[in-house]
């Protein structure tokens, strides 16, 4: 019956050279034919037929706003994936053209770490020099007070500026250590990717590549407390100063808002502790940093490696956090 209807319809419209025939399914699920498509079917899936009843064009239904949005999202993801693949291929080419073997990657990494270490040594030397200057300023101020004389404003300013400089240098050390952490992470990824590209097996990897990070770096991380709020930092700061007073073997000679210092070590058994309250580089959040110094064996020493100092570094954070109830 439907075929007969279609044949009659085709015969009727064949009288006009420009007549078109459309086929669609209405809202009741019935197939409809006509030389004009109704407005209700324009956005739905429909077909245009020729004089023989063959499909010459098929139009899908119009997409919903949700479907259009989803297509755009998928397209963006595909473009982002292609971009990342292209960037990865470019990095791979640079990696393979820069290094011939794993040892060269390790040497490049260690060279950059050595640069940071050199800068840290310089900064520690600056801190020692600044502490000497601060000690000299404070002795002069104490002498004037004993004589009943007023402390000159310039001397007061010198003391305050020196304290700030010491804190700034400690902040610099933490930035340098963070830089070292980033270098290790970057070269670890480079080394992993190099192995993937060269298809090296784990059992054939040189043992030298398993070099661990410097224990000093890990110890520095263990003496950093991060504050979530000012009130919390006030509590941690008070506990950190109590810790320094308890464990330092030299007398306190600076107890200010953002820095606490005990006097430099006088003999081989002394431990001098400094606690700094520092602003972080990328926000208004604060951190508290403990530094432990013992008497130098050689002029180039910047790090106290005595067992009692190492134990204090290990216990600092757990002790403070426990006492602060965090």
Image: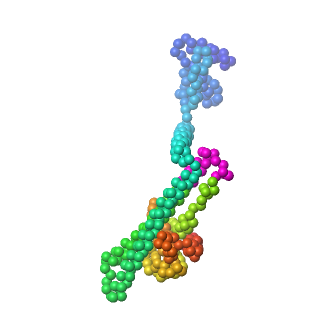
Identified at 53% across, 13% down, the residue is: 16
Residue 120 in the image: state x and y as whole percent: 47, 65
Q: Is residue 288 above or below residue 253?
A: above
User: Magenta span has 190?
Assistant: yes
Q: How many discs appear? A: 0
Question: Which colouring convention does the figure follow?
Answer: rainbow
Q: Position of residue 3 (x, y in %)?
A: 66, 17
Q: Which residues are magenta?
A: 186-205
Quarter of the picture holding the C terminus: bottom right
Figure quadrant of the N terminus: top right
Asked if the magenta segment contains residue 225, the reply would be no
- Observer-nearest of 28 and 53: 53
Location of residue 215 with respect to 95 vertically, above or below: below
The residue furthest front is 298
Q: Position of residue 115 (x, y in %)?
A: 47, 60
| Residue 80 seen | no
């Amino acid at each position: 019956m439907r075929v007969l209807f279609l044949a009659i319809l085709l015969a009727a419209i064949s009288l006009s050279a420009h007549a078109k025939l459309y086929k669609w399914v209405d809202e009741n699920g019935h197939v409809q034919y006509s030389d004009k498509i109704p407005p209700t079917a324009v956005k739905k899936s429909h077909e245009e037929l020729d004089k023989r009843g063959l499909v010459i064009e098929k139009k899908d239904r119009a997409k919903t706003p949700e479907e259009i949005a989803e297509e755009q999202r998928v397209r963006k993801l595909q473009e982002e994936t292609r971009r990342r693949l292209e960037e990865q291929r470019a990095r791979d080419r640079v990696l393979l053209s820069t290094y011939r073997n794993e040892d060269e990657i390790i040497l490049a990494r260690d060279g950059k770490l050595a640069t940071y270490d050199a800068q840290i040594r310089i900064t520690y030397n600056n801190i020692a020099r600044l502490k000497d200057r601060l000690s000299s300023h404070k002795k002069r101020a104490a002498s004037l007070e004993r004589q009943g004389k007023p402390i000159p404003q310039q001397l007061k300013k010198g003391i305050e500026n020196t304290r700030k400089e010491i804190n700034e240098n400690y902040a610099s050390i933490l930035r340098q250590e963070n830089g070292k952490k980033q270098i290790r992470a970057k070269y670890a990824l480079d080394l992993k990717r190099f192995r993937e590209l060269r298809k090296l097996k784990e059992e054939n990897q040189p043992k030298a590549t398993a070099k661990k990070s410097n224990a000093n770096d890990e110890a520095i991380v263990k003496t950093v407390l991060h504050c979530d709020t000012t009130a919390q930092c006030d509590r941690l700061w008070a506990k950190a100063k109590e810790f320094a007073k308890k464990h330092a073997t030299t007398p306190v000679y600076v107890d200010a808002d953002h820095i606490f210092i005990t006097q430099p070590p006088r003999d081989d058994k002394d431990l001098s502790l400094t606690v700094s309250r520092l602003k972080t580089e990328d926000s208004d959040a604060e951190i508290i940093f403990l530094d432990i110094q013992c008497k130098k064996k050689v002029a180039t020493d910047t790090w106290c490696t005595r067992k009692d100092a190492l134990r204090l570094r290990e216990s600092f954070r757990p002790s403070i956090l426990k006492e602060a109830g965090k």
